Amino acid sequence: MAARQQKKPCGNNNDDKPAIWAGYGKLVRLFRDKAGLTQQALADAVQYSYEQVASIEQGRRPAKAAFTEAAERVLGAGGVLATLQDEVERAKLPSFFQDFALIETEAVSRFSYDPLLVPGLLQTEEYARELFAGHCPQLSEETAEQHVEARLNRQKLLTRTPVAELSFVIGEAALRNPLGSATVMREQLQHLLQQGQLRNVEVQVMPTVRGFHPGLNGPMVVLETLEHRQVGYFESQGVGLVISDAAKVSSLGLRYGKLRSQALNTEESARLIERIAGEL
């Protein structure tokens, strides 16, 4: 595989900090004051630096789950901080995706077609990091890392209870597009094979030689919530659209059904993924 090319600057993307981070930080300070602790004392107790604790309290940096767990124990927060952790994590996601990410947490089924990239729910940490490193406009290292953390946090959907039924149809081009080093891609393909072994997960590949199929119009997601509400979603170039109109969602469902029938079955897909991984 060719050596990784140096990425060219593509502007900057400096978003305002989410309000939930500021609200979480104020609660940390409130509980800390009630406990009679200084910022340094709290930092020592949770094994974070003074600067990290100060940033969290000021809403400049989101708390990770490990911090929340430790702060709950040290400050006796009674589950208040833990209750906010999912919202803190969700705010790390790109703003256009956050509404759908909230709906996604309530999914009983989720079917997606991704022609050009491995879907986020199945990405490895290094693959996701390569994607965000190449973002245009360029993201700060801190923001890119937060997006990676949030993407990995979403993957709880694969193994959570109650179980969600998940189907992924992935374009062959996504498996052959060399993001990062050969090692990154090989590990990503092996990860796809592992996740495809989960009882509630099906991974199928749409070959590039298939000719016309409904997925040529672009990626899509069809989702059903706990309340059995049908929702569609698609995104392109940093713009996401949630579709709730029943007729439009029904059309997406029909297209997805046709896609699944035209794609390789799960066993054939696994063999193709193994073959591509062996070529790296």
Image (tube, grey):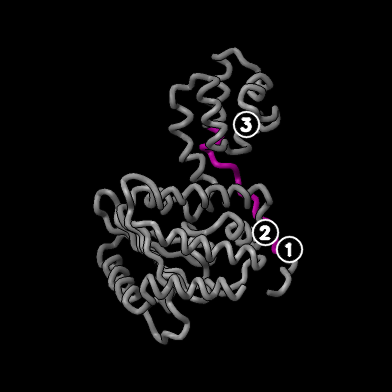
Q: Is residue 136 visible?
A: no
Q: Nearer the viewer, residue 118 or 279?
A: 279
Identified by mark 3, the residue type is Gln
- Expressed as whole percent of the image width and height from the top left, the position of residue 256 reads 33, 71
Q: Which residue is mark 1?
A: 9
Q: How many marks?
A: 3
Please name the residue shown 34% across and 48% down the image.
106
- In the depicted structure, whether residue 40 falls above or below residue 110: above
Query: At label 2, which amino acid type do we have?
Result: Gln
Residue 204 falls in image quadrant: bottom left
Mark 2 lies on residue: 138
Q: Amino acid at mark 1?
A: Pro
Q: Which residue is mark 3?
A: 58
Q: Quick check: marks 1 and 3 in contact, CB under 8 Å?
A: no
Looking at the image, is 96 positioned above or below residue 77? below
Rendering coords of residue 161 (x, y %): 34, 44
Residue 77 or 232: which is nearer the viewer?
77
Task: Give the image location of residue 241, x and y in percent.
Answer: 42, 61
Mark toward the start of the polypeptide (2 vs 1): 1
Q: Is residue 16 magenta?
A: yes
Q: Report if residue 247 is visible in the image.
A: yes
Pointer 1 local density, CA inside 10 Å: few below 14, some 14–19, many at least 20: few
Helix, strand or loop under label 3: loop
Image marks 2 and 1: residues in contact by CB distance under 8 Å: yes
Q: Which residues are magenta?
A: 9-23
Along the line of sight, the residue nearer the viewer: 110 or 271: 271
Measure how far apart labels 2 and 3 are at the Cα level. Answer: 25 Å
Q: Residue at image x 59%, y 66%?
A: 186
Upstream in sequence: badge 1 or badge 3: 1
Q: Residue at x 72, y 65 (%)?
A: 7
